[in-house]
Image: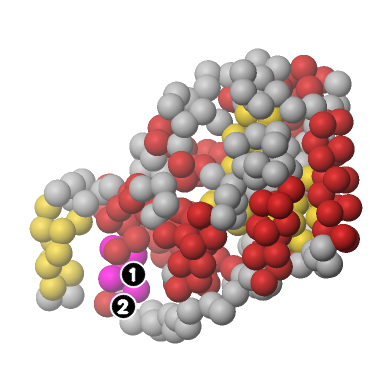
Amino acid sequence: MKTGHFYRSVTALVYTQKLSHARAPLCGQSFNILPSAQNFTALFDKLRELFGEKKEEHIPLEDLSLMEVDIHSHLIPGIDDGSKNMDDTIYLLRQLESLGFRKIITSPHVVTDGYNNSTETILSGRDKVREAMVANGINLEFDAIAEYYLDETLSEKIEKRDLLTFGKNYVLVELSYLNKPNNAGDIFYQLQVAGYKIVLAHPERYPYYHENDFHNYHSLKDRNILLQINLMSLAGKYGKNAQAVAERLINERMVDFVGTDLHNAKQLETIRACLGQKYLDRVLRSEKLLNHTL
């Protein structure tokens, strides 16, 4: 049975039988079946073992060369909450190079009430970083897009075709962490009609999407919205719920891109800690992942 189909079957079993907070016998064993994000991953792995699916061998990764390309970081100095100066940027790029990346597509914030960066500001900053990379002997490919916050000005940018894209006209979009935006559906539709392919940044970090037994995530995929999880979610950087959701997205083969979302040197330790995570190995070996196509 394919992993995605198997996982959805488990989900259906739990919810159709309404086994919330119950104890259920399974092949002579009993364990709690809790329909929450944090328990689906453990349930999935347990059922794979009990029903005889070959146990996945896991050897910790030595680096991130399987990922090849990072599409989410904040490395243009001084324009958002990422790198503060060029020295920081060069240090971070050296570390990413040592981790096995061949290309970095950095993505500074574009937020009207915070980091209201223009296309010109971002591209000018990209060019300065490229010059510094040459001067410091860093051989990575380096490009820049933006992480567009879904606010009232994004619609205007779409109309003007003033969006920085990557790959096959992909555009990286983020949402509020606190409240589900009422106009998200309209903006997504506007982007798609204009010919853009939406990549939703770190969907595992939006608490309002954690509800309704993953229906919100399946709805996004049904609308042809691509999902980019943060690598650091797999190490619990953003909490247990975000980690569990990221793992489930991987199990259901719903992840299209992985990004570091690197802002500063302190986060490098967390990124390296991810190398031992079996879910990172699983997603980087998935034929669904698109990072290597860029």
Find the magenta span and give its range: 43-49
- Residue at image location 85% in from the left, 45% down from the top: 128
Q: Residue at x 80, y 36 (%)?
A: 122
Q: Which mark is residue 101?
A: none
Residue 121 screen position, x and y as percent: 82, 31
Q: Quadrant of residue 81?
A: top right
Q: Is residue 216 magenta?
A: no
Q: Let me know if residue 44 is in the magenta part.
A: yes
Amino acid type, callout 1: Asp
At label 1, counting other C-alpha atoms closer than 10 Å, the crowd grade (few under 14, some 14-19, many 20 or more) is: some
- Dot 2 falls on a residue whose secondary structure is helix
Report if the CB atoms under discs 1 and 2 are less than 8 Å apart.
Answer: yes
In depth, the one of 149 and 97 nearer the eye is 97
Quarter containing the C terminus = bottom right
Give amino acid for label 2: Glu
Q: Where is residue 97 in the image (x, y as percent from the top left)?
A: 71, 68
Residue at the disc numbered 1: 45
Can you give x and y, in whole percent of width and height, for residue 145 in the image? Answer: 77, 42
